Amino acid sequence: MTNETNELKTYTMQELYKQPIEPVEYLVDGLLAPGLYILGGSPKVGKSWMALQLCLAVCGGKAFLGRATRKSEVLYLALEDGPQRLHSRALRLADTAPEGLHLCHRAAPIGQGLEQQIEAQLAEHPHIRLVVLDTLQKVRCTSGNGLSYSSDYEDAGALKALADRNGICLLVIHHLRKMTDDDPFNRLSGTNGLTGAADGTLILMRNKRQDGTATLYATGRDIEDVEEELEFADCRWRRAVPPEQLRLTLVVNALKKLLAAGEFRGTATELAAQLESQGSYWSPAILSKYLQCHDEALAKCGILLETKRTNSKRLLCLRYEAQASDACDTSDGSDGCDRYSYSGGVPSLPSQPSPASRPSLAS
């Protein structure tokens, strides 16, 4: 008698094509979807800060690193931090305690009760869609020389099966190796068995140990490859302002200051001279071209541009409408969901830098 459990269950390509394609329901748009994801980083790089920031964002349905989130309850297994440290860190990130964030600082190892513990929490709190496990090493039974591709794949496979069974995103925090590698994903501690079983991998690498900037790399089955610069300030990770957005910010701030006294009408040379008198230095030709190429972005910040040509010269006509710039002034440029477009606004910067330190429009 044939054992049906040993038979391959096949289907045809035609049958597959008849099945509807369900859209991916991201927990974090373009970055985290249902399945197993691994976030790797060196010790003290800020992984746990990022994990807690992510939990708070998803619970509140707020943006995370400039990406929209799907609001849901969260289970955070902070196995390296006790209640006191979690309390202290949470107060640095949020004034009030959000609903739906469940915390725990002890859990059984993989294969020895962890899966059952998590599924019991999911049954008790069915609205949990994100589980963060910090860190992987705290729930592994093998260590040191006992680690191999087989054991890595088995542990990661068990966690992926847990995520798939319950339709959740399971983010596991892990460490990096000390040895360098041109491929940041090869820096993840252990073998390729971890990344091979996971649905996606994120690597957080500081540019310098004492620097407040880092690069986030991400790759996965349901996400496009990511490489973006982040800044760490006030215990919070933010997307760094892109050079193009920084240039626009400098121009907008300089023009707002100039147009506070009224409309401007004149040549690019005259405009550059007036900006220079208030400490802003721009080449007339580059300034004129830049303003005309970015007239729509300027308009969203309340600066309206018209150009008129006479027989001998081209005139620039500028005026500032504060009401039109309301949307521009309400975003810090780092936590919105604008994908670096200008619809979310331009961040305010401090006073203009000196000519030596200012990035030129041509850079």
Image: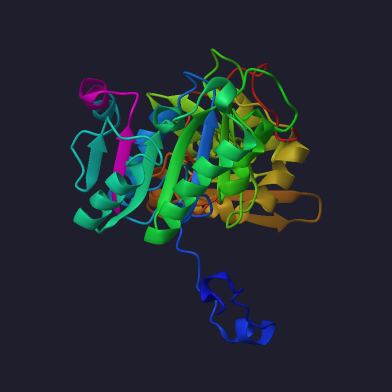
Residue sitting at x 63%, y 46%: 196
Q: How is the image coloured?
A: rainbow
In the image, is 95 to the left or to the right of 200? left
Residue 20 magenta: no
Q: Nearer the viewer, residue 288 or 298?
A: 298
Residue 142 vs 223, above or below: the answer is above
The picture places residue 357, in percent across and down from the top left corner, at 64, 18
Residue 81 magenta: yes
Residue 220 vs 215, above or below: the answer is below
Residue sitting at x 24%, y 51%: 120
How many numbered marks appear?
A: 0
The picture places residue 109, in percent across and down from the top left corner, at 37, 35
The picture places residue 218, in percent across and down from the top left corner, at 60, 43
The picture places residue 119, in percent across and down from the top left corner, at 30, 52
Q: Is residue 32 visible?
A: no
Q: Nearer the viewer, residue 202 or 155?
A: 155
Please state the extent of the stretch shown in magenta in the rendering.
72-88
Quarter of the image for the C terminus: give it: top right
Which residue lies most toward the front here? 1
Q: Is residue 40 visible?
A: yes
Quarter of the image for the N terminus: give it: bottom right
In the image, is 341 to the left or to the right of 57? right
Which residue lies most toward the right here? 312
Residue sitting at x 34%, y 41%: 114
In the image, is 46 to the left or to the right of 89? right
In the image, is 30 to the left or to the right of 82? right
* Quarter of image, res 147: top right
Q: Nearer the viewer, residue 281 or 33?
A: 33
Residue 221 vs 74, above or below: the answer is below
Residue sitting at x 69%, y 50%: 315
